[in-house]
Image (cartoon, helix red, strand yellow):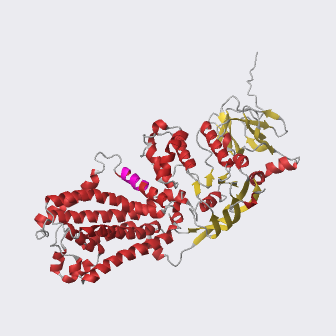
Amino acid sequence: MASNLGSAAVKRTLLRQLVITDFKLRYQGSVLGYLWSLFKPLMMFGVLFVVFTFIIPTGKDVPHFPAYLLLGIVIWTFFTEATTMGLGSIVGRGDLIRKVNISKLSIVISAILSAGVNLIINSVVVVMFMLFSGAEVNWLLVPFLPLLFIELILLALGLAFILSALYVRFRDFAPIWEIILQVLFYATPIIYPLTLAFNASPKIAEVLSLNPLAQIMQDFREILITPVTLTTHEVLPPVFSYVLPISIVLILVIGGYIYFKKRAKYFVEDL
Amino acid sequence: MSNDSKTIRVSVEHLGKEFKVPHERHSSLKSSVINFRKRSFETFKVINDISFEVKEGEFFGILGRNGSGKSTLLKLLADIYTPSSGKLRVNGQLTPFIELGVGFNPELTGRENVFLNGAILGLNQREIEEKYDEIVAFAEIERFMDQKLKNYSSGMQVRLAFSIAIQAHNAILLIDEVLAVGDERFQQKCLEVFAKIKQDPSKTVIFVSHDMGSVQKFCDRAIVIHDGKLVYEGEAKGAVYEYKKLNFPEQITGSDVNEESKDRWGSASIVLERLKAIEIEKPDGRHNIKMTLDIRVQEIKLLNKEIACGVAIWSAEGINIAGPNSLEYTLTAQDGSVEYLIENHPLNTGTYKITAVLYDATSGETYDHHERRFNLSVAGSSNREIGTVVLGGQWRQIK
């Protein structure tokens, strides 16, 4: 159907306005405003740092553990925010969808981008920590960082496509996704180094390495914090360790997109 | 008409839309899994086999009562709903005008809302920036643009919303009864905008309304929808006639066939939908009469115009006992009810007929006249007196 919604400039403007609005409204009426989105991961970092440095010293063998831990938490925060906001995005904008033929894809993408804005702000703190605790940046691999970012964003986007469409029909997916996130938090090497899992049982480390998020996280850490960290490519057969997570991400994005497009026509009626 | 050669902008062929309403709503996974096999739906055909075409430059009306399916049709045209059957082709860029201020956020400033709403209506950043000054000027709220929308009066919000919407207009406009916005002066401005659009041969307008006045004024052609079906397609005048016939059959037969039994007439631009007259007994044994007149404004341009109500009470013998009216009170045209209360009424036991009239307070033009079409039964305070009224006089013996 011919309508000006198809134009790329319009979609860009819509995306931009949705992200700006979200940014402006998120901490509306709070005194500290956007500082809160820094405090959340920092508080989590503080608690986990104390626990895993003094009580259960899992990170004692990891060089630059504070930066290592914070980077993990920041990536994890982005992942949870992006998928959770993505999940609720269509239902949350139900009032718009019922009244105008608005690009539904833009709504989901804007949720991911909003989480992305937070990720950028949090990255500043990570860089500060890296400077303080002396991270060993692998400059040769730094050009691969954008690819890792893209992989992370696509992973969140694919999941958001599927979750947002499912959530329109079944409100169960909010608690379901919350539970899955809880499991994933421990199944991903965020608070413990992958080495620890490997030492416990190489089999466990192999299973954990199937998770694209684990691959992304460990690759980020290897490039930015320390080459000592165990990456999924050292746990799994090297070729397999690249092909598998990328395939999972692509399947999620393409499959999610197709499913989303198919359901999008009926969002108005299902809402 | 010689516009046969013109481009067809909107073509609708055998369009149908059904809504499946499950008898039990499955909004949770559990009930959906458990009842997977025994899902039962009730299907509502909201739009049933509708076909029409709109050509470039036309001002095309869609008339229908509330619940006739006209809003669903509009949402189908706006690509918000997906048709269940039939074909729908739109040739050109289309701006839906279904609700003003979609996505307006009270916590954002006027300026921010212009950009957000503009983006939702399908403008790009550059277009919004270019049209920003014009939008603000049309809405007449230059001074308030950096204030939060929540501090705006509702009139200001509507003006801002309308100003953005008219800037967003494309080759095809879908307008849904948005004329009923703002104060009289702003309405006048809106009408001027519509008149300008009407003159522009490159603009195509689809105008959905239950306001016969504006359909007749603006539309070249119109369709009438009733219960999801197309009952008329043709000139606007004919559409209004058809619409009147559907809604006020007695009035049309009355004024057109000129039958002797006609008991209702008027322009029907404001109608009296119902009159309820009851007698209420008070604790002291005396009685009040309360009449409630349900009024509906059919022509939006008459909203808030000063109107008058009049009733006449007739005895069973056909004698006009009284004829009070509201001329001493200020009543304005709006959807709702008007009450007329007679305290300690003087009527004697019996049944009475009531005439009710709605008319223009200044010109006296009759909107809706119901000649003795309502009944009132009175128990009365006295059952020993005869005659139609109880005068309530006092008897006293003088020695």
Check if residue B251 falls in the magenta segment: no
Q: Is B303 placed left or right of A41 in the picture? A: right
Q: Main secondary structure of the magenta part?
A: helix
- Work out whether residue B320 or residue A147 is closer to the camera in this orientation and state it: A147
The residue sitting at 39% across, 53% down in the picture is A20
Looking at the rendering, the stretch of residues picked out in magenta corresponds to A17-24
* Quarter containing the N terminus of chain A: bottom right
Q: Is A239 placed left or right of B266 in the picture? A: left
Asked if residue B103 shows in the view, the reply is no
* B347 to B294, vertically: above or below: above
- Work out whether residue A267 or residue B272 is closer to the camera in this orientation and state it: A267
Q: Horizontal and vertical percent for residue B293?
A: 69, 42
Q: Horizontal and vertical percent for residue B357?
A: 75, 39
* B296 to B16, vertically: above or below: above
Q: Horizontal and vertical percent for residue B93?
A: 59, 58
* B72 to A247, vertically: above or below: above
